[in-house]
Amino acid sequence: MSATAGRPAVYAVACAGDPLDRGRHSGIPFALLGALEELGLRTVPVRTAPSEPVVSAVARLRPGTRNDAYLSPSVARMRAVASGLKLVRRSAVAGCIQWGAGEFLPPARVPHVLLHDQTLLQASAYPWSFFEGVRPATLGAAIARDREMHRRVRAVCAFTHWAARSAVEDYGVPAGRVHVVGLGRNYDVPPPAHRDWRTPRFLFVGFDWERKGGPLLLRAFARVRARVPDATLTVVGGHPPLDAPGVTGLGRLPLNAPGSRAQVAQLLAGATCFVLPSRFEPAGIVLAEALGAGVPAIGTTAGGSATVVGDAGRTVDPDDEDALVAAMLELARPEVAAALGARALARAPRFTWHAVAERLIRALAPPGADVEHLEPFL
């Protein structure tokens, strides 16, 4: 899009909370702001959610939990009004990229795309603490608003094919307005000049131990270790005390700390397979980071991980322990792990925030513009 009077166009990045806080939403809005500026564009962060005291006040006035209040129609109206006013005051905004489902609709004159890793309908179908205590009527109304937003925005940009299908099949968005744009890595780990594939070294990084499939992985690894005695498993995240042959637990490593990031980078550089058999995984930024390090991955079929893993690994049903054991034994073979590691490196350039930002700008182009269609990027 062209700039006014020779100045770069201004793009808003909107989300619940502060988009400049790299600790929110897995750092996605923060990363997008940086990627857009790398493209030579000006950006403005827009906070769509009311302040905590406002949500708490609404919660006191209605039955239910705080999360029920957050999803209520009254808070939704406040989000819409407040966010719309922020954009109206900035007449030079050429487009708005909104992260997350069901937040707000900006003024009609502002081109608007919705970026997310799942529809609200998909999120509500899986056990997730956010929906605990949310009344069915509140959730139903929130899903209805989410469906309406999907239908009214210029384009729906999904991280994965799984999320894109929901926009089309569940919400009725025309397929031509739904694009799979992928996701980016929050940090890059250069692959080592030489990786020893002879000894299987599995790596798990996940803070939510139960949801990320930690208990399943421990059971599966015990069976793998019985077949491959020199195999090891390193676990990073919110795991319980671990005391099993070949298993090393490192606990939580805050990735905003330079020392922790360096330690995880070292682990990725030394691993031969990354395993994340989540009970539910909308996409998995950490899977993209594993690919960037040249590490093949085993992901889950519950969600959109297959878009990220692609031909650089395997995906398994999180209820099928036998399938996970089979996949781990397959990638314990040096020749298989090395071949899939090469595919991981070939796949990695597709998953950067710079590439995602370029796809989003194309999606913001007016209907009929001569722009590349985004679906086949994978």
Image (cartoon, rainbow, N blue to C red):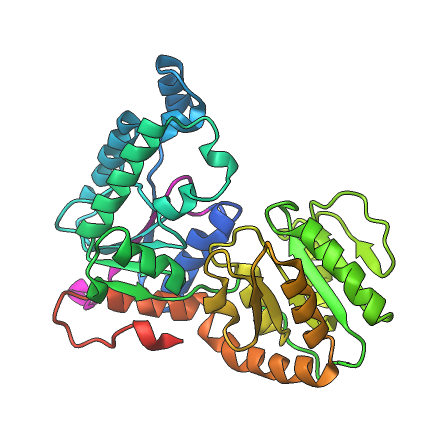
Location of residue 318 with respect to 231 vertically, above or below: above
Report x, y in % for residue 234: 76, 60
Left or right, 87 with reference to 341: left
Q: Which residues are magenta?
A: 1-20
Residue 204 forms part of the magenta stretch = no
Q: Nearer the viewer, residue 272 or 219?
A: 219
**Which quarter shows the N terminus?**
bottom left
Q: Residue at x 35, y 49 (%)?
A: 119
Q: Residue at x 43, y 60 (%)?
A: 34
Q: Nearer the viewer, residue 256 or 331?
A: 331
Report x, y in % for residue 315: 56, 66
Residue 16, by quadrant, is top left
Residue 69, by quadrant, is top left
Left or right, 244 with reference to 93: right
Residue 77, by quadrant, is top left
Q: Is residue 205 in sight in this rendering? A: yes
Residue furthest top in the image: 61
Location of residue 87 with respect to 202 vertically, above or below: above
Q: Residue at x 41, y 66 (%)?
A: 182
Report x, y in % for residue 198: 79, 81
Residue 16 forms part of the magenta stretch = yes
**Which quarter shows the C terminus?**
bottom left
